[in-house]
Each structure stands twice: as structure tokens, then as C-alpha cells.
Image: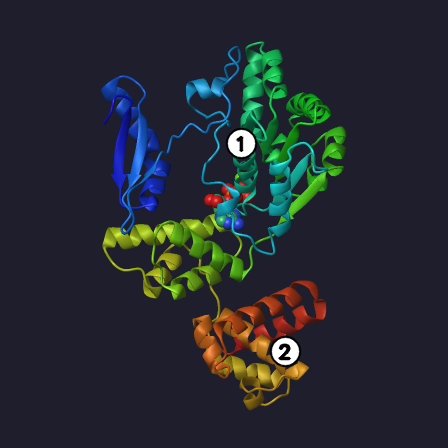
Amino acid sequence: MSENSIFLQVPSKFFYDWIESHYQDTIQSSLREITGNGINVKYTVLLTNEAQNVIESRRENHLVGLANDFEPKYAQTGMLERGTKINENYIFENFVEGSGNQFAKAASMAVANTPGKTTFNPLVIYGGTGLGKTHLLQAIGNSALAQGNAKKVVYVSSDTFTLDFIAAIQKNKTTDFARYYRGVDMLLLDDIQFFQNKEQTQEQFFHIFNDLYQHQKQIVLTTDRPPMELKGLQDRLLSRFQSSLTVDIQPPNLETRIAILSKKASDDNLDLPYEVIEYIAQNVKSNIRELEGLLIRLLAYSSLMQVDIDINLARRVLREAGTIEKRVVVSIEDIQKIVSAEYTINLNSLVGKSRTKEVAEARMMAMYLAREHTNLSLKTIGIYFGGRDHSTVVHACKCIEERYNTEKPFCTLINLIKEKINNLL
Ligand code: ADP
Ligand code: MG
């Protein structure tokens, strides 16, 4: 412990994340009680092989101080933190690219490189929860700051913006409020769907928006639905958003999910068996936050119970988390039989070398269904199809999913076959 800092040594970044997210307040308030003043908590992560690596959790890359004459109510009471804090892990380098988020990432990087100077002003990022909107938004801020492309960057959630605005009204400080926001180089406003039906806040925002826009300051917004579908938003605000560039983030496909999990694991110096990664990625489909949550749960389990992470532990954790949907599990042989009957081809060609269009489609279909309706790993599935590589199975699943989502008749066909699988039980 030094004069104004305390160092905590933890075995891995996972512990640091866990302590930060669960005990930060407790630790802070205890320290305040004991020492009578604020103390920085810093973490030292003991890396197994490498030299020690210091993570300063409270590093001051907090962007802007508050304007002197404007005191946000919620920051003061400690109920809600003012949104000027940017998570230093939310950077482009940590954002795994996949087909669903490629364009959003590229647009975000363009904006960070030349804020206010691209045609993407404002840039609107939309996508479902847990798909990386906040991550991208803050990555823009972090990158622009690091490159020196912007000095005053403010990240704020629309909720906090609204609460602060209300507080400003109560204190007769709306002028200060507006001045504060008009003085920024870059405004990153998260989750603008919270603005719905908040007319006065929208009004205020509209003026700030116009002012920043006219001064070529970059504005980036996120929303969990397409701008056209934001109900309860004033028309003039809507038309502003609609004339901007909107980029969407789609749920990650299997490969991207595997890539994200592998990256998180290796960032944490974790040696996860590939089959565990694959198993989690197969079962958690729509949400990256959930993907991360499961990884953390798995780690917590294994460290508390002192067992290695393997496929059985992963199964158990996912089942307890309620992630695994109830699905029909059958044998891969049954699936192969049903599919070859449906396509009227024989079983040998299904697992053989033929590449005719029909056989190839049937094979991909059977691989996809095997992934959905057996507990076999992709590698094992490949083996059942004439010793093919696991990447072939991944590719097959992707093709089928794509057609499932875009071709009506194909979708009907899959449902029909699934029906037959269900009837096996
Ligand atoms: P949203 O704001 O869309 O609800 P977040 O940005 O909070 O989602 O993302 C949820 C979690 O998933 C965060 O921890 C984020 O770092 C992580 N995440 C999302 N997308 C990616 C990605 N492409 N690569 C790595 N991590 C990601
Ligand atoms: Mg978010």
C-alpha cells in the first residue's frame, strides 16, 4: 500500500474482472472507511510464464473532467456514474471481426481516424443486446484519443444523459448542461432508444446535435433497433438519424463465436480445450455477453471446485445456466438415414466422395442436423462423414443456416426433416 494506492495481486485477469465487477463498491467503501479518503485500487496480475504485468484498473484515461459549474446530480450521490468513463479494454484490437460486424467495425474505424470529416456523421450503430455496440462505440473514443484525433471525448448512455438533464433542470443549470455538451469534440451516445417519449430531453439533444454537427464534431449513436422503428421520437430527430449512415451488427455465426471465445481465453492466459470452446460456441448463439458470462462461470466453477475445465464441466455449467435448449438428441446414424431417404440417395454416397450438387447438399444438410441434434463435436461429425475435416462441417453448417434464413422452400424442407427427427423419439 502506498500513500494513495493499494495494490492487489491476483492470479489472472479473470480474477481482476470478477473482483472489479462484483466487489469494487465494497472494497472502495471499506477503504474509505478505514483511511478516511479515496484510495486507488490497482491490480497486479501474476502471469504464469511471463513477467508481471500491471493493470491499473483506474488509469486516468477518463476523458473529460466536468465543467466546473456543472455538477451532475447522479454522479454526486454516487447512484449513477456519469458516463464519461471509457473502458480501456473496449478497443478495436479486442473486437473480433466476423461477417456480422465487419462493416460496423470498418465504419467505426473510419470515424475514429478522421472524426467529423467522413460522410458518416452522425454514425448510427444498431444491433441486438450484447452484440458489441457499446464496445465499438467506446473503441471509437479510445482510438480517437490515442491517435490524438480528438481531445474532449464524451461517452454517455442516453439514460445518464436524461437523468443529468433532469437534474440540471432542477438546479436551473440547463445552460451549463448545454455548454458542457457543446464543448466536446466527439459525442458518443449509447442506447438512444431510451430517448423514446422523453420530449424535453430530445429537444435539448436536438439543439446540441445541430450545434456539434455544424461545427463538424463527430457524433456516434447506438440503438437496439433500426432508427425507423424508434417510436416516440420526434420526427425532426428521426429524419436526422435517417439521413445518416446506419450500420448494423448481426449475431455472430459459429466461426465468429469460436474466434471470440478463443480470443477471450487466450487474453486471460487460459488453456481451454478446443472442444470446450466449440461446445460453448455451439450452444450460445445470439449474444456475446452471454458467451463471456458462461466463460466466467466456467472459470469460477473450475477454480472454486479445483477441477480442470473439460467438456463435462462445460455441459454441467451450461445446463445449470439454463442455456441449453431442450432439443431432441438422436444418433448420427439416424440423421444420415433420414437425410438420405429424403434426398433419395444411398447412404454410401452421403458419406462418400461424390460431389454432385444433390449429394453435396444432402451431406451438408446431414452435417448441419448432426450438429443440431447430436452431442458430437464437429470433429467427430466430420469423421462420420468419411473422415472429413471439422472445418468442412463448420462450412456446411454455415451454408445451410444461410439458406435456412433466406430461402423459403429450403426452410420448409429443413423443418420437415426436423419433424421426422422429432418423431424418432
Ligand atoms: P451491446 O452494447 O451491443 O449490448 P456490448 O458492447 O456491451 O454489447 O458487448 C457485450 C460484451 O461482448 C462486451 O464485453 C464486449 O466486449 C463483448 N463483445 C461484443 N462483440 C465482440 C467482438 N466482436 N469481439 C470481442 N468481444 C465482443
Ligand atoms: Mg450497450
| CA distance separating discs 2 and 1 | 50 Å
Q: Is residue 125 above or below residue 154?
A: below
Residue 156 in which image quadrant: top right
Indicate which label's residue lies in the foreground, 2 or 1.
1
70 vs 120, nearest the viewer: 120
Residue 311 in which image quadrant: bottom left
Q: Is residue 368 above or below residue 75?
A: below
Q: Is mark 1 on a helix, strand or loop?
A: helix
Q: Is residue 368 above or below residue 9?
A: below
In percent of width and height, residue 287 lies at: 51, 51
Number of numbered discs visible in the structure rendering = 2
Q: Is residue 244 left or right of residue 134?
A: right
Residue at the (62%, 12%) spot, across then down: 175
Quadrant in which the N terminus appears: top left
291 vs 327, nearest the viewer: 291
**Badge number at residue 361:** 2
**Badge number at residue 166:** none
Q: Is residue 380 left or right of residue 176?
A: left
Using a 10 Å C-alpha cutoff, classify the residue at mark 2 as few (fewer than 14 neighbours), some (14 to 19) or many (20 or more).
some
Residue at the (33%, 40%) spot, across then down: 16
In percent of width and height, residue 186 lies at: 61, 28
Residue at the (68%, 38%) spot, across then down: 230
In percent of width and height, residue 366 lies at: 56, 77
Three-letter residue code for mark 2: Glu
**Badge number at residue 145:** 1
* Colouring rule applied to residues: rainbow
Q: In this view, does 13 lie to the left or right of 238?
A: left
Q: In this view, does 289 lie above or below 24?
A: below
